[in-house]
Image (cartoon, rainbow, N blue to C red):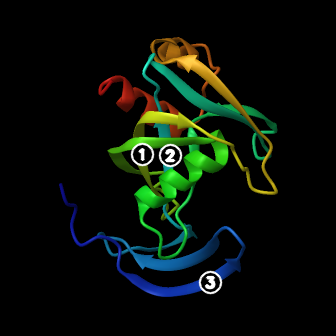
């Protein structure tokens, strides 16, 4: 479905340059001719991984997230480095965060994280044929690996134990595949 000609950019300026993302402010013309501004977070694509073992368990990670000021139970996730393929990033993040390697990595979907203001898209993967190894979180990460039954996921979502959108989306997609 398309709507008109979109929003042509008439002027653009970089408002913030950060380590993880930049912010751009665009002056655009709407299809009705009016002009407005759009604040856009420029962020690289990312990956998330739902690792499921032969017994039907999924490996999640619990880590403190500063923006909501709380521990969050979520799927393995991280950024795609420049020049890195999405599947390669998924395998790297799986090893770093959960200490796991996967024989099979199946793309579940690609989705926009927050298309109203952000350019970040996420590739969601299902990892199977798991082998245990050592996790190696990055210096600024403190991660606890939590194993739960994949069949328990809907209740963990309904109860609010799992609250972030990438985890809810990718776990629900995985339930339909396993």
- Occupied quadrant, residue 5: bottom left
- Judge depth for marks 2 and 3 and give the one in front: 2
**For this rendering, which residue is in front, 73 or 157?**
73
How many C-alpha atoms fall within 10 Å of the one at disc 2: few (<14), some, or many (≥20)? Answer: many
At horizontal 50% and vertical 46% (from top left) the residue drawn is 48
Look at the image and tell me in which quarter the N terminus lies: bottom left
Please state the horizontal and vertical placement of residue 119, each as a whole percent of the image: 48, 65
How many C-alpha atoms fall within 10 Å of the one at disc 1: few (<14), some, or many (≥20)? Answer: many
- Occupied quadrant, residue 18: bottom right
What is the secondary structure assignment of the residue under circle 1? strand
Q: Earlier in the sequence, mark 2 or mark 1?
A: 2
Please state the horizontal and vertical placement of residue 17, each as a whole percent of the image: 70, 79
Please state the horizontal and vertical placement of residue 153, each as a whole percent of the image: 50, 18
At horizontal 55% and vertical 69% (from top left) the residue drawn is 81
Tell me, for residue 30, which label it has, or none.
Answer: none
Q: Give the residue at mark 2.
A: 48
**For this rendering, which residue is in front, 34 or 6?**
6
Q: Are marks 2 and 1 in contact (CB under 8 Å)?
A: yes
- Occupied quadrant, residue 169: top left
Q: Give the residue at mark 3.
A: 14
Q: Are marks 3 and 1 in contact (CB under 8 Å)?
A: no
């Amino acid at each position: 479905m398309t709507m008109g000609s979109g929003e042509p950019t008439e002027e653009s300026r970089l408002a913030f340059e950060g380590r993880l993302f930049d912010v751009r402010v665009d002056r655009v013309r709407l299809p009705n001719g009016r002009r407005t501004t759009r604040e856009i977070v420029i962020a690289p694509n990312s990956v998330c991984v739902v690792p499921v073992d032969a017994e039907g368990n999924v490996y999640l990670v619990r880590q403190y997230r500063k923006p909501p000021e709380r521990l969050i139970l979520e799927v393995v996730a991280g950024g795609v480095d420049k020049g890195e393929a999405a599947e390669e990033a998924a395998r790297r993040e799986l090893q770093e965060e959960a200490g796991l390697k996967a024989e099979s990595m199946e793309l579940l979907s690609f989705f926009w994280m927050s298309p109203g203001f952000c350019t970040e898209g996420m590739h969601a993967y299902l990892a199977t044929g798991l082998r245990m190894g050592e996790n190696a979180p990055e210096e600024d990460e403190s991660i606890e690996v939590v194993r739960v039954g994949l069949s328990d996921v809907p209740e963990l979502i309904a109860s609010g134990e799992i609250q972030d959108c990438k985890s809810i989306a990718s776990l629900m997609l995985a339930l339909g595949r396993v």
